[in-house]
Amino acid sequence: MSTLQVSVYRYNPETDSAPYMQEFQVDTKGRDLMVLDVLHLTKEQDSSMAYRRSCREGVCGSDGMNMNGKNGLACITPLSEVVKNNKLVLRPLPGLPVIRDLVVDMGIFYKQYERIQPYLQNDTPAPAIERLQSPEDRDKLDGLYECILCACCSTSCPSFWWNPDKFVGPAGLLQSYRFLADSRDEATSERLAELEDPFSVFRCRGIMNCVAVCPKGLNPTRAIGKIREMLLANAT
Amino acid sequence: MVTNITNFGRSGLSDWLIQRFSAVILALYTLFIVAYLLLNPGLDYATWSGLFAQTWMRIFSLLAFVSIAAHAWIGLWTVTTDYLKPTGIRLAVQSAIILAIFVFLVWGIQILWGA
Ligand code: SF4
Ligand code: SF4
Ligand code: FES
């Protein structure tokens, strides 16, 4: 038998008084499909279901969701990686307001991203051709710039669940360090001054859920440790 | 920057440093007390009070008391800001915690220098 039992979180605030789980039987024909393919098959059974996706190859970051309890990108997560006992449970990313079904409101996530000023700041007049960077300095940005802002990490972080308005969260902090580590950026001390309160960075408890789920294999906890080191060096 | 007034240091960095420093002090103090008890099996009142009559032991103990007060406050302040969302309840609990810590600290000092 290649029938998969799929249960999907459904919620339409205009018609439903409460969220509920809808059950589907999906025939996978024995193939190891990606979770996103399974979602397409369930949508064929009930076209009222809503979810986000665009690139379907792990690049755009729009189909982050909770699959059998773990956040990830549905388009690059094969069934063999998540399915247990022939059952697949799909829920929206935890901790964010649900707009409809698997679609969440990412507003507060982007607000924290905006707060860390995710752009290069340099008031020195630009040289005729370009601002140069040594290969060694460029290497420091590896493991930082690759983030696709899928929010899988921040929405699996308990510290972000409790204080999403004050704690920047792993995604924002990884990007914050991306600019702190950039040899061309001149706003280092202003950036650090924004981060030394008890919430923005220090609410991180080192639980490392963020590292466990990042579909790009990035390590926000390491970046947070580096920011802490910079704050310490700056203040002692 | 996120502002907050109930946290005394107002700096996450100093909280973080104090938390680590006080943890080391508390670990040393615990190790010392455990080692002392193991090395003095038939401990009687005279020896025990003799230990605490010495100035260095009083200083070490006071350091441990202050460390536990700071450590407990920072830790519990964090817990209240994580889990207690209504401002009134959070403030009340924080006040109760600070009051208890103050009482225990003064009481501890009185025990150290009193007897
Ligand atoms: S760090 Fe990883 S999990 Fe977090 S937003 Fe970026 S790509 Fe997604
Ligand atoms: S390591 Fe920090 S940022 Fe990452 S999940 Fe844990 S608390 Fe959140
Ligand atoms: S659809 Fe673009 S990352 Fe999955």
Image (cartoon, coloured by chain):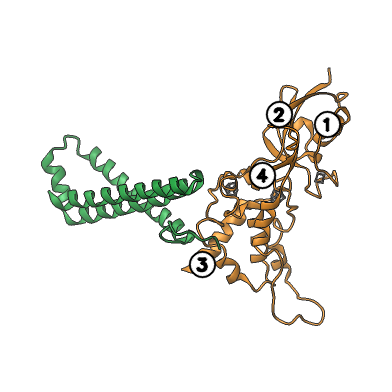
Chain colours: A orange, B green
Residue A136, relative to residue A91: is it above or below? below
Q: Check if mark 4 and mark 1 are on a common chain.
A: yes
- Distance between the alpha carbons at the discs numbered 1 and 3: 50 Å
> Is residue B94 found left or right of A234 in the rendered image?
left
Is residue A181 in view from this perspective?
no
For label 2, the residue is A20
Residue occupying the point 55% across, 51% down: A204
> Is residue B86 found left or right of B24 in the rendered image?
right
Residue occupying the point 59% across, 70% down: A190
Foreground residue among A123 and A228: A123
Q: Secondary structure at mark 3?
A: helix
Q: Secondary structure at mark 4?
A: loop
For label 1, the residue is A38
Callout 1: 10 Å neighbours few (<14), some, many (20+)?
many
For label 4, the residue is A96
Callout 2: 10 Å neighbours few (<14), some, many (20+)?
some
Question: Mark 4, chain letter?
Answer: A
Q: Is mark 1 within 8 Å of ligand 3?
A: no
Query: Looking at the image, do the residues carrying marks 3 and 2 touch, with CB atoms under 8 Å apart?
Result: no
- Distance between the alpha carbons at the discs numbered 1 and 2: 19 Å
Amino acid on which the number 2 mark rests in the picture: Tyr
Query: Looking at the image, do the residues carrying marks 1 and 2 touch, with CB atoms under 8 Å apart?
Result: no
Is residue A123 in view from this perspective?
yes
- Distance between the alpha carbons at the discs numbered 4 and 1: 24 Å
Q: Secondary structure at mark 2?
A: strand
Amino acid on which the number 3 mark rests in the picture: Ala
**From the viewer's perspective, is the residue at label 3 or at label 2 nearer?**
2
